[in-house]
Image: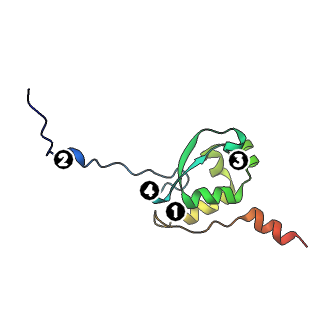
Amino acid sequence: MARKNRDETASWHVELEPTLCPLCERAIPDDQKEDHHLIPKSKGGKITVPLHRVCHRQIHAIFTDSQLAKTFGSIPALLEDPAIQKFVAWIKSKPPGFSDAAKDSREVSARNRRP
């Protein structure tokens, strides 16, 4: 019986297709990949999808866990929201490794209303 030639390096170089962010449809670099629970873990969610870190942070900056659980528990539901549509239109022009601080609209507007 012939032994397999261990020097065959062709099988060592497997090109994997890049993971695409379902929100912005850009390739996600490994160092920018975060798993998003479609329904937050605090609300019993188990299913996750990979997103860019900046996309993931923006979702949580815009919505509360309750909103995510009740109304925005899927990518199509998220994409129907005008704030997400505006963010996606902006982020699509950025390179895949782009990182920016998400603006927490809930906390900022709440802070500005307090006396």
Numbered badge on residue 21:
none
Is the residue marked by circle 4 packed among few (<14), some (14-19), or many (20+) residues within 10 Å? few
The residue that label 1 is drawn on is 92
Q: Is residue 14 above or below residue 62?
A: above
Residue positioned 53% across, 67% down in the render: 99
Instruction: Tell me which numbered mark, 4 or 3, is placed earlier along the sequence.
Output: 4
Instruction: Tell me which numbered mark, 2 or 4, is placed earlier along the sequence.
Output: 2
8 sits to left or right of 85: left
Q: What's under tag 3, amino acid-wise? A: Leu
Residue positioned 59% across, 39% down in the render: 47
Between disc 2 and disc 3, the foreground one is 2
**Dot 2 lies on which element?**
helix
**Dot 3 lies on which element?**
helix
The residue that label 2 is drawn on is 10
Q: Nearer the viewer, residue 4 or 65?
A: 4
Residue positioned 65% across, 39% down in the render: 45
Circle 4/circle 3 CB separation < 8 Å: no
Residue 114 point in image, percent of width and height: 88, 70
Mark 1 and mark 4: Cα distance apart in space = 18 Å
Between disc 4 and disc 3, the foreground one is 4
Circle 2/circle 4 CB separation < 8 Å: no
Is the residue marked by circle 2 packed among few (<14), some (14-19), or many (20+) residues within 10 Å? few
Mark 1 and mark 2: Cα distance apart in space = 35 Å
The residue that label 4 is drawn on is 30
Instruction: Tell me which numbered mark, 1 or 4, is placed earlier along the sequence.
Output: 4
Mark 2 and mark 4: Cα distance apart in space = 23 Å
Which color scheme is applied?
A: rainbow
The residue that label 3 is drawn on is 68
